[in-house]
Image (tube, rainbow, N blue to C red):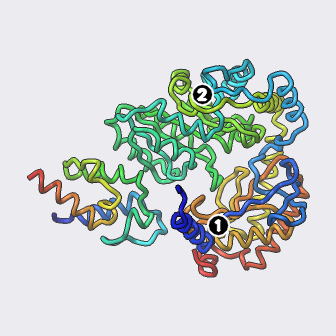
Amino acid sequence: MAYPEKIRNVYQEQIKGIQNAGLFKQERFIHSPQAADIEVEFPAGAPLKKVINMCSNNYLGLSSHPDVVKAAHEGLESRGYGMSSVRFICGTQDIHRELERRMTEFLGTEDTLLFPSCMDANAGVFEAVLAKDDVMISDRLVHASLIDGIRLCSAMHDTYKHSDMAHLEEKLQLHADKRMRMVITDGVFSMDGDTAKLDEMVALCDSYDAMLLVDDSHSSGFIGKTGRGTHEKCGVLGKIDIITTTFGKALGGASGGCVSGRRELVEMCRQRARPYLFSNTIAPVVVSGVLKVMEILSASTERRDKLEKNAAYWRKGLTEAGFVLREGDTPIVPVMLFNAKLSQDFSKALYDEGIYAIGFFFPVVPQGQARIRTQISAGHEIHHLDRALDAFIKVGKKFNIPGKTKQEIIQMYGM
Amino acid sequence: MEGLKDVVLQYVTKEYLEDDSEPLNFDTPLISGGIVDSFSMVSLKRFLENRYNIQIPDDKATPEAFDSVNKIAVLVEEFVGNKS
């Protein structure tokens, strides 16, 4: 037998260890479309509860937009349910090409290639364009999907302190002897909500003859004046060599992702990237939905403008209430609690108050950096934010958090 | 080797620690203690090779061999010793 009792026991002990360390994650079951107001079953078997969602990546509120749903239906009718193929065999429809063209235009690049997810895009891109004589230099807080892709590549890998441009420059100097250098960063960092200094990074990359890759998954659609992303915000449109991004967040929230950038680098991905070669193409229904999202975004900046205002309102409210936040101006607003169990208890208490926001703890964030990561949406109205703020303050007082410093919270609860 | 451990400690402190971190000593577990991740070993290896004009084979540059300043010093001395 492949799974004897003694092996089962090994894993049961590991699971028990995760539970005892206060690091066990539990799913909640949502019985409604994704929106600011959702109905949740938690724990399993409990009656449904109406709550305000404060932790989705539905930044522009388009995940259940009727026009997007209608376009997806039309895509199902006109292009079918699934392609049963990878892209290069018989998995490319005209709508895939159209979406690649739209993304190229929107992101201000030379070419784009779709992937089943941005996780796949990040898994495939480095191995496709770099080799063992090259070096990848990544920010120490890049997303897990970038780390996984870096691990799959034979090029050397080094890191620089988070957003530390002086340290990045030291690394570019250290690796000047390599054939190629690629600097890798998130555009907006997913756990802290801060923004990469892309203008400074472009200048450094120019000086040291390095390429720059930005994962803009938490930016595409709403960062920058017209929502093109972090590069627009930092005034470096057209200067990023590779952008990876997802359609699973602001751009509809279903699935899919892409690599977009210099023509030759994208072509190398088309020829060599393993997730592109070996994983199923994005379903026509999803492509149709994203095309409608891009049409909506290109017509007006109304949604990203509203999101910006909502995020500022939320951040101001939490700051005035005395919570410890990570600095930033994006819709990702982490409320720092530092202790894993505290973050879980806080989340449960928020849920009792009708607010859905999850505790983030190791290994998702570093040990001792647990938080409630709140995320604002253009789908939130002011009454949602006021209601959520009241709940945070009420729960915060219960745990004696508002007005306390990081050191004081750690003293009370430990790390 | 004179000052080797101090040089390594200074480099590791500057390279890996943030301002509010606990100070390191020669026995602080660097990799197993989560201070240096396995990716970041690369720059440490390059620093040692450049500084002491040695080549450390990849199969010797293990997380175990790099897990403290004391262990790193043993490794460097082995290759500096081999050279002379």
- Outermost left residue: B84
- Outermost top residue: A94
The image quarter in which residue A412 lies = bottom right
| A8 left or right of A374 in image | left
The image quarter in which residue B38 lies = bottom left
Q: Residues within 10 Å of mark 1 (few under 14, many from 20)?
A: some
Q: Considering the numbered disc 2 on the image, is that residue within a helix, a strand or a loop?
A: loop
Location of residue B35 with respect to A164 vertically, above or below: below
State the residue at coordinates (35%, 40%). Answer: A175
Locate residue A188, reporting x and y percent. Answer: 63, 46
Which residue is label 1 attached to?
Answer: A24
Locate residue A174, reporting x and y percent. Answer: 34, 44
Q: Looking at the picture, tell me which residue is in the foreground, A224 or B48.
A: B48
State the residue at coordinates (76%, 40%). Answer: A254
| A214 left or right of A206 in image | right
The image quarter in which residue A286 lies = top right
Which residue is label 2 attached to?
Answer: A238
- Kind of residue sitting beneath label 2: Gly
- Outermost bottom residue: A412
Q: Looking at the picture, tell me which residue is in the foreground, A104 or B56.
A: B56
| B70 left or right of A281 in image | left
Location of residue A344 with respect to A296 vertically, above or below: below
Total residue callouts: 2
Locate residue A327, reporting x and y percent. Answer: 65, 58
Distance CA(mark 2)–CA(mark 1): 43 Å
